[in-house]
Image (spheres, rainbow, N blue to C red):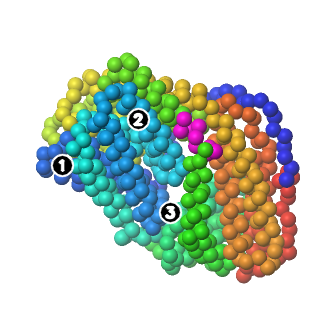
Amino acid sequence: MTDTPTRPGRLPVRSLPLASALRLSRPSDTWFKPALSVVVASAVPHLTLLAIGRLDLVMYTMAGSLCALYGHGLPYARRAGAVAGVVLGMTASLAVALVTASLTGSTAVLIAVGALLAAAQKVLCDATRIGPPGHVIFTFVSSAALFAPQRPEQIPGHLALTLGAGAFAWLVALAPALVRREGPERRAVARALTAAAECAADPGPRTRNAAAAAVHAAWQCLLASGRPTPVRRSLERLVVHAEGAFAAPRPGGGGAAGPDRLRAWAALTRARGPVPAPPPAPGTADELYGIDAERAALRAPEGRRAARRALLRRLGPGSPLLPVAVRTLAGCALAGYLCAALGVGRPYWAIVTAASLYQANITLSWNRALQRTLGNLLGVLVFAAVLPVSRISPLALVCCCLFFSFAAEALITRNYWLGSVAVTPMALLVLEFGGAHPAGELIGDRVLDTVLGAVAGFLAATLVTNRRAAGRVERALDATGRARADAERTGADPGAAPEARDRARRTLTASLVELREAGDTAAGEWWQRALPEQRLLAAERAGHRTLAATAQRRGPGGATPPAVHAPSIGAE
């Protein structure tokens, strides 16, 4: 492996985008799933509380109902555990907030606890990669609860409401399994086929990286999906075709499966009919054998221990998440204390605004600051327009909240600011469950909190440096080099076990995905040493060449032709 020297010094401050941050994109192909789930999960507790005349308890049931937003990209076997963890995490966060609120009325202490909770929630959500919506929902619930009047004897009942609503949200999140057991896997494979078709039709760094990420996500989804079924077997064969198309693309779509066929398979896979049965691809039998072996290894005690060790590394002292946690803590505390100093009655809105900004790097955090500010300012206008309607009756208030819950999830995948236009009136209407408030006061506080929270949050992001971003790139380069060498060695060895060859190739794909993610994250950071961009590009090219070479060696029936080594990482 040849190394391109890294130039000393630091990157200059990069220009920050404006128009691109606000540009609308196509909606997610599954936007309706979290939207419908949160409406169903919220409607039953809301209407129950309405029937017994206790709408003042909505905040506690809503904490559990919002857990229905999570896990929609996961197969149901994995989703059951993930959403259960979300419910327990939400309850634990709420418990800390309620106990703190019952013990002290000091605004300074409440803000400090809110900032600490926001930082912990950010780290845990990023480390476990649970999301979207990630940590923001947790911070919204716990921060609001900190500033709600609370007595110690009320806490068990309020937590029981959250657990009850969370259990119902868990059922709602898993209910689609009764109708379409392999739905998440089908969508993941359809995305992989579509991305592979784009790469086969127009090979290039952008399409190749996108296809690698989609194929890797599809394999991970299938590995986590539970025992093999006939449908999952067909899906695995489709991913083999997608993998071959992106690993060794040819202009015009030459190869075993061209872009038109891949797109047709993607459409059929995404639809409700039978999964298409593709013809056998070279190496399919070995690939499926390798998947079974890898699935068994992941479920073995050693595999579970390895997964726990990987999670602990992401949470440990050397974690790349630590600077983002410090940013979150500093920004939320600064926003809360600034609002308290100015006499704002609800500093938790500023805390939530600041917490929502923190993304993988400064550039993305800037985008989120723009989106959050614009969305909230437009949202208060919507709130002003809908407030008279919500005050017609308690049922009208419940219906308005449910409508905005659906609208938020329907719009947020187009752009975060568009979803915030619906989130803001929903958050303001929640206050109405405890009693009517002056509209002018609510709007004024929300506008001030939004602006102060965004300014304080972004200021903290610029002042707290993330020098570990470049170090993550270096580690990813090393990991990619090792994975490439292992893939070449096992691919060239006629005696290598099929599962070893396929596992090595999937490991190389995963390392390339991590390398691109690390590079994109570091490219958007300030105040760090210059990145080894030439090494990064050379490593990606060499890795994809190795994938192509190993795919070509998998001849018909899994036979392995003579080895042809991929170029070294420094070759052009």
Name the residue type under label 3.
Arg
Residue occupying the point 34% across, 22% down: 344
Labels 3 and 2: the sequence-earlier one: 2
Q: Nearer the viewer, residue 470 or 33?
A: 470
Farthest residue toward the left? Answer: 52
Labels 2 and 1: the sequence-earlier one: 1
Mark 2 lies on residue: 113
How far apart are the alpha carbons under marks 3 and 2? Answer: 40 Å
Residue occupying the point 47% across, 50% down: 131
SS at badge 1: helix
> Which percent across, then down, holds residue 487?
76, 65
Farthest residue toward the bottom? Answer: 557
Name the residue type under label 1.
Leu
Image vertical order of residue 148 relative to residue 89, above or below: above
Which-is-in-front pick, marks 2 and 1?
2
How far apart are the alpha carbons under marks 2 and 1? Answer: 30 Å
Labels 1 and 3: the sequence-earlier one: 1
Name the residue type under label 2.
Val
Residue occupying the point 68% across, 69% down: 503
* Residue 222 disc label: none
Q: Are marks 2 and 1 in contact (CB under 8 Å)?
A: no
* Residue 49 disc label: 1
Residue occupying the point 49% across, 30% down: 331
Q: Quadrant of residue 551?
A: bottom right
The answer to whether residue 498 of the structure is visible from this angle is yes
Would you say 469 lies left or right of 62 here?
right
Would you say 185 lies left or right of 406 here?
right
Image vertical order of residue 113 relative to residue 230, above or below: above
Which contiguous range is marked in magenta? 318-326
Instruction: Check if residue 324 falls in the magenta segment.
Output: yes
How many neighbours does mark 1 have within 10 angstroms: few (below 14), some (14-19), or many (20 or more)? Answer: some
Mark 3 lies on residue: 187
